[in-house]
Amino acid sequence: MLPSADQQEILRRRTFAIISHPDAGKTTLTEKLLLYGGAIHVAGAVKSNKIRKTATSDWMEIEKQRGISVATSVMGFDYRRGSGPGHSQQDDTVYHINILDTPGHQDFAEDTFRTLTAVDSAIVVIDSAKGVETQTRRLMEVCRMRKTPVMVFMNKMDREGKDPFDLMDEAERELGIHCTPVTWANGQGLKFESVFALNNRPSELTPKLQEELEMIDGVYDAFDREAYLRGDLAPVFFGSAYKTIGVQELLDFFVENAPSPRPVQAEERAVEPMEDKFTAFCFKIHANMDPNHRSCIAFFKICSGKFLRNTYYYHVRKDQQMRFAAPTCFMAQKKETVDEAFAGDIVGLPDTGNFKIGDTLTSGEKLHFKGLPSFSPEMFKYIENADPMRQKQLDKGVAQLMDEGVAQLFVSQLNGRKIIGTVGQLQFEVIQYRLEHEYQAKCRWQPLQMYKACWIQVTDKEGEIELDTFKKRKAQYMATDKEGRDVFMADSAYVLNMAQQDYKHITFHFTSEF
Ligand code: G4P
């Protein structure tokens, strides 16, 4: 076990992700949280609207251009309860909050899903005018699967929107959660101009408000922290990120009740955060985060113990000791070199090609963390060099972006042409843009009619014989993935069906992790 001062460090950590549909208000809410934490200093709706344009959490140029977050970034800040503007309630704990930003666009679902493996809880933001949308539902499925505790922020209540009871009904139905409202609106003047905590109701109640509160008491279970931590109960908050209504109530409740770092299940055993042995896994790799330094950063979530700068750790996959002179943590928009970090924190390690997503670092133990999902690509295109003078740069760019997990690369065994597989159109645009801006390389896309990439596997002798025939017969459809594995590129559902029927000893997998 760690010494108690280190345990206190871990107990005060809150590492979470905000998940939502694009435009629900994730960026606006993130900024307001940073504002309360004193991590940024621009107050007021108008100005914050301005910084939104170069959003603090959006590192990459393309995100600014398109106004969407395409890469997950990390923001850390310290916060003491009630220390936000205009409030006096005090609590001596200084919480350390790590927000993992997630790309909201559905094309980047894979990146978002991976981020969810690195958080201890989540806040779901719902646009109260639009209700629950598909993207949010899919993300919530991952949270349910992982039993991630969630809180819900019903945003944009300053606008004409759905009735709050209807919203909670919808959330329960669509997201498979049990709601318990924690704040409610005073209902005076502007719709939801102000919000109060339900355990601290105003003494003067309008008849309508009285009726609503009675209904809440009658219908919803009271907040029960244990049920929330099990993922069985979701506290719900109403407010407006833009007008900063209900945000402090959310933040105060969050730091007090959200879990500190939770145990993480490795393949070998469960890892407890308070163990004195250090363990961490890589959930993201980001190339060229800083245009002035052409480096990659591997993001590691610390699962247990304490990380120290310039100390040797064991890189399990490479079976090699490594130490890091310039590890970074992320304080709001700044990257800072850190001497130590604790379970719950995310450290960025400068990487020159040593890391892959899913890699584990430990104090010496051979551990493997599981649960990093990989996706079945749905769209395929040939990538071609559009600038013959820059072939090397193109190759390097493609290789690095694939290591980041932006998309998947296949090389045709027939003619050596490179095929990129993605889950959506936007990924092609991002790749093209980043190749141009980060590697000064130009690419062209050629259409390719393709249904699914299938990783093929055999387990017995008969299978091996079958595989031989299969590869000869299907030579023109065979490709190789980044790891050198055989992939069958089925061009239609029919072809795949036939192959599955004809080759009973071969198993066809649709993700690279099987
Ligand atoms: P996202 O990160 O989830 O994609 O959403 P983001 O915060 O960028 O917000 C999307 C839009 O919704 C923005 O407007 C933002 O100002 C607005 N918004 C966020 N929270 C609230 C709220 O509580 N009330 C109201 N009325 N609007 C809110 P935009 O038109 O896209 O940009 P801008 O004109 O504000 O710059």
Image: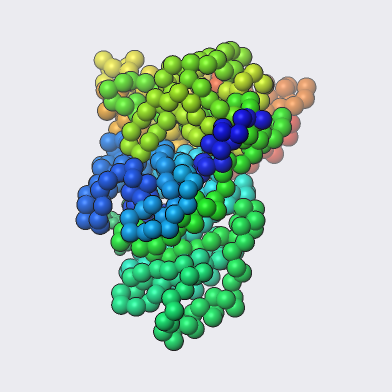
Q: Quadrant of residue 386?
A: top left
419 w.r.t. 257: above or below? above
Work out whether residue 4 or residue 246 is closer to the camera in this orientation and state it.
4
Instruction: Kindly tell me whether residue 105 is visible in this rendering.
Output: no
- Pinpoint residue 112: horizontal percent, then vertical percent: 48, 42
- Pinpoint residue 176: horizontal percent, then vertical percent: 59, 61
On the rendered image, what quadrant is the C terminus found in?
A: top right
Image-based side of 291 in relation to 324, left or right: left
Q: Quadrant of residue 66?
A: top left
67 w.r.t. 279: above or below? below
| Ligand 1 shown in quarter | bottom left
158 w.r.t. 350: above or below? below
312 w.r.t. 109: above or below? above
Work out whether residue 24 or residue 134 is closer to the camera in this orientation and state it.
24
- Pinpoint residue 224: horizontal percent, then vertical percent: 62, 61
Instruction: Kindly tell me whether residue 249 is visible in this rendering.
Output: yes
- Pinpoint residue 488: horizontal percent, then vertical percent: 57, 30
Work out whether residue 238 or residue 421 is closer to the camera in this orientation and state it.
238
Image-based side of 18 in relation to 233, left or right: left
Q: Residue furthest right?
A: 461
Work out whether residue 112 or residue 185 is closer to the camera in this orientation and state it.
185
On the rendered image, what quadrant is the N terminus found in?
A: top right
Which residue is rendered at x = 43% and y = 69% of the image?
196
Which residue is rendered at x = 41% and y = 55% of the image?
82
Which residue is rendered at x = 57% and y = 18% of the image?
313
Q: How many marks?
A: 0
